Structure formats: C-alpha cells, structure tokens
Image (cartoon, helix red, strand yellow):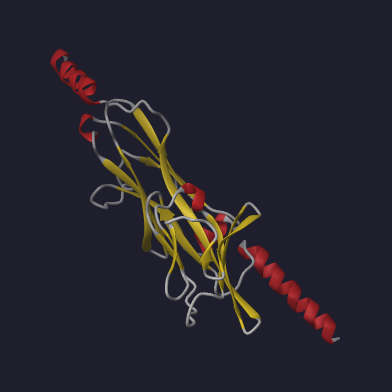
Amino acid sequence: MTDKCHMCLLGLILLCSLLTGTIGGPLDTHEFCSSGGSVRLPYNNALSDCTSTTWTYSRHLKSVELITLGKKEKDTERLSLDSDCSLNITKVTKEDYGSYTCLRYVNGQGTDARVYLHFLHVSPSSTQIRSGSSVTLSCQLYYDQVYCDTLVRAEGVQLIWVNQAGEDLQTDSRYQISPPGHCDSTLTTTLLDEDNNTEWRCLLTQRNEAKTSAAYIVRYSGKTQNFFNRYWKIIR
C-alpha cells in the first residue's frame, strides 16, 4: 500500500511538471536579457568558496559544462563567478539563451538549481527603411525547455512597445500592434520624415516589473534620403 502511495505521489509531481511546462523545483528561476547586455544567473547558496560548484549549459537537449569545480572550461572573459557562486555573463548574444544548471557537492551530497535564460530580440521585416514606406518590427523572445504559456501565465511575462520616452504605443492609432499575451509581438507603421533616428523599444516585463528591452532605431539613408525629402516637398 505504501509503495502505491509513493507511485501516486510521483505521478502527481510529474503531471504538475508537465502542466507547467518544465520539470524543476522551487530554486528554478527565469532571467531575461537582450543583445550586448550583462546578466547574473543566481545560485544564492554561498559556502566558503566555489571549488565544489559546476555550471552546465544546455539547449535542445545538448549540454556542455561551463564551470567545473569552480574553474572555467573555456577561456572566455564573458564568464565569471560571484562570491556566492552565481554565474555572470557579459556581452550576451542570442546563442546564450537556454537552461543553466548549478550543481554543488557538499559532504558527498549534491544540490542543484536551474536558471532559464531567455533572449529578447527586435528585427525589421524589410531593409528598405525610408520615409513613406511601411515597416513591421518583430519582437521575439527566445526560450528553451519551457512553454510560452508558462512564461506568460505562470511568470507574468508581457511584451510592450514603447517610444524613447517610455510611453506605451498601444493606445496610439498610428501603430498596429499584435495583441499582448504571447512570446512575440509585432509593430507596424508607416514611416514619416521625422521618424529618422527615432527609437522604438520592445519592453519585457515580469509581473509588471521591467526586466529587459530590445530597441530598433530608424536610420534613413543619409544624404540621399534628405535630398529626396527636400525635392519631394518642393514639387508638392
């Protein structure tokens, strides 16, 4: 009877893990970043040193050790350990998103914590950026080993388009923005003369707290575009 109870309990744990989109414990956390930024992957279980700490990175079911017993496996200046053995990554790129696991052995027993690193990126639909043309900006959150529904509902993640002043563009009829509640969002608008050097930003919030953002700056084609604009105003 006891064995059956244990099996039932194990089944419930696995079912809850599948429903939430990930298998993990209370130490699992989510971090967000964009290109060129820095991120700290927390462990927060400090001992006297980090010689018992191993950090492993995995994506698409492929894993590699970054830190083994406190020492870097790769000679890269982008990785470093805090005094509490948290992992720091600088100059973040799209290739860094995935799952990071910290494993520590103390008195022959191992404890681990997992951090999911998600990457935010904005790109235009066209390279023909000029006044009068329509442009669509795509904001994409890259993630691995979790479901988008987990990030949106369980973690309270939202993508919001804002201008340089941080004002929400959702209420401006000039912009067509896809509905919130997903891990990707698009902004479509027709470019004006005064949009040159304008910045639009995709802001990621978690439970209404800003976590990271990715920006797109409108760049017209210099003197050629300026000449075209002046000539067009004259002949009109």
Q: Can residue 182 be seen at all in this image of the molecule?
A: no
The residue under the point 62% across, 61% down is: 21
Residue 105 left/right relative to 123: right
**In which quarter of the view is residue 204 placed?**
bottom left
Closer to the camera in the image, 106 or 119: 106
Closer to the camera in the image, 20 or 128: 128
Residue 32: x %, y % from top left = 44, 58
Looking at the picture, does residue 115 appear above or below residue 187?
Answer: below
Dividing the image into 4 quarters, which one contains the N terminus?
Answer: bottom right
Residue 233: x %, y % from top left = 15, 19
Closer to the camera in the image, 24 or 191: 24
The residue under the point 65% across, 67% down is: 17
Residue 64 left/right relative to 84: right
Residue 207 left/right relative to 5: left
Dividing the image into 4 quarters, which one contains the C terminus?
Answer: top left
The residue under the point 40% across, 56% down is: 90
Residue 2: x %, y % from top left = 83, 86
The residue under the point 45% across, 76% down is: 84
* Tally of numbered discs: 0
Residue 148: x %, y % from top left = 55, 55
